[in-house]
Amino acid sequence: MKVPFSLGILLAASPAFAAPAPAQLAGRILEVNFNGAMACGVICDEAGEWKPAVATPLVIQFPAAEGTCFHIQLDKPVPGEEDLWQPNKVSYAPQGEVAVVQVRGYMRNLVLTLNFDNPDRGRADLSWGMDESAWLARGATFRLRPAKINKARVELPTREEDVDEGALQTLDDGLGELVRELEQRKYPTAVERLYRKRLLTLLPQIMEGAPIDHSLSDSNGTTALHNACGLSHVEIVEWLIDHGADLNAKTAKGAGVDDCVGGPNAAAIRAILRKARQSAE
């Protein structure tokens, strides 16, 4: 399978590095978000116009066993051609302050270059080659987080042109069910209702690709985690932390997420925050 020459140009444009790449990603989830990235198509080494990328995240979960590669069946074999549709090989190769992740299978060669800003986050460039064509993306963001269960998982991005208009969705990963449950809850105080209203605005935006730590323009800089702590909603707090929410986020007035903790589950939420900070050390 041919990887277009444009990949070399793409990687050469990568931003400056700031942190060494981990030796391996065993037991961790890599999530690449294309919100804010630029993308173009390449056919027979001819690159198209760079445009804002519209795609669902790329997610790769590395099993807990130590190592830098694993195999996973992503495609349903075509009857009579089972020998061609072998499991995809997923490999991770750290190279100093850069790491290259590759997903290679029948009619597929996805190459992801990670540039680490810190041990858990950074910028990513992608080349998805298929025969003489490819989809390139640059300026995506990625984050690493611990996996709760030991499994191998790959969720390839779905691009805008691959789906009907209006049908593109980002990763749900259980958040949609939490939003639906929150819509049914009733809260007695005005403060709780304000936290609920903000979450019902922020969480769908996160599902659609917005950064997990963004805030509403009229909310004084409170993130979803601030609001979930204030609402004393344990499951949403856990989901946000599991998906990389900033535990040290501050509002415009300097309030941290711990300052918002309250309600009947305050003790449980403080324990969750404490454990998450210890795990990050």
Image (cartoon, grey):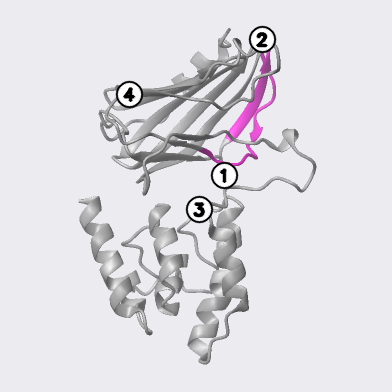
In percent of width and height, residue 220 lies at 46, 73
Q: Is residue 50 magenta?
A: yes
How many labels were placed on the picture?
4
Does 196 sit above or below residue 140?
Answer: below
**Mark 4 = which residue?**
68
**Mark 2 = which residue?**
132
Horizontal relation, residue 111 to residue 260: left or right: right
Whether the residues at callouts 1 and 3 have beta carbons within 8 Å, the answer is yes
Q: Earlier in the sequence, mark 2 or mark 3?
A: 2
In percent of width and height, residue 121 lies at 36, 42
- Position of the N terminus, as image quadrant, is top right
In percent of width and height, residue 58 lies at 53, 37
Q: Earlier in the sequence, mark 2 or mark 4?
A: 4
> Which mark, by number, is residue 35?
1
Q: Residues within 10 Å of mark 3 (few under 14, many from 20)?
A: some
What element does badge 1 sit on? Answer: loop
Tell me where residue 218 sits by quadrant.
bottom right
**Mark 3 = which residue?**
211
Q: Earlier in the sequence, mark 1 or mark 2?
A: 1
**Residues shaded magenta:** 38-58
Q: Residues within 10 Å of mark 4 (few under 14, many from 20)?
A: some
Does 143 sit above or below residue 128?
Answer: below
The three-letter amino acid code for the residue at tag 1 is Asn
Does 141 sit above or below residue 221?
Answer: above
Label 3 to label 4: alpha-carbon separation: 28 Å
The three-letter amino acid code for the residue at tag 2 is Glu
Tell us which disc is closer to us: 2 or 3. Answer: 2
Q: Residues within 10 Å of mark 1 (few under 14, many from 20)?
A: some
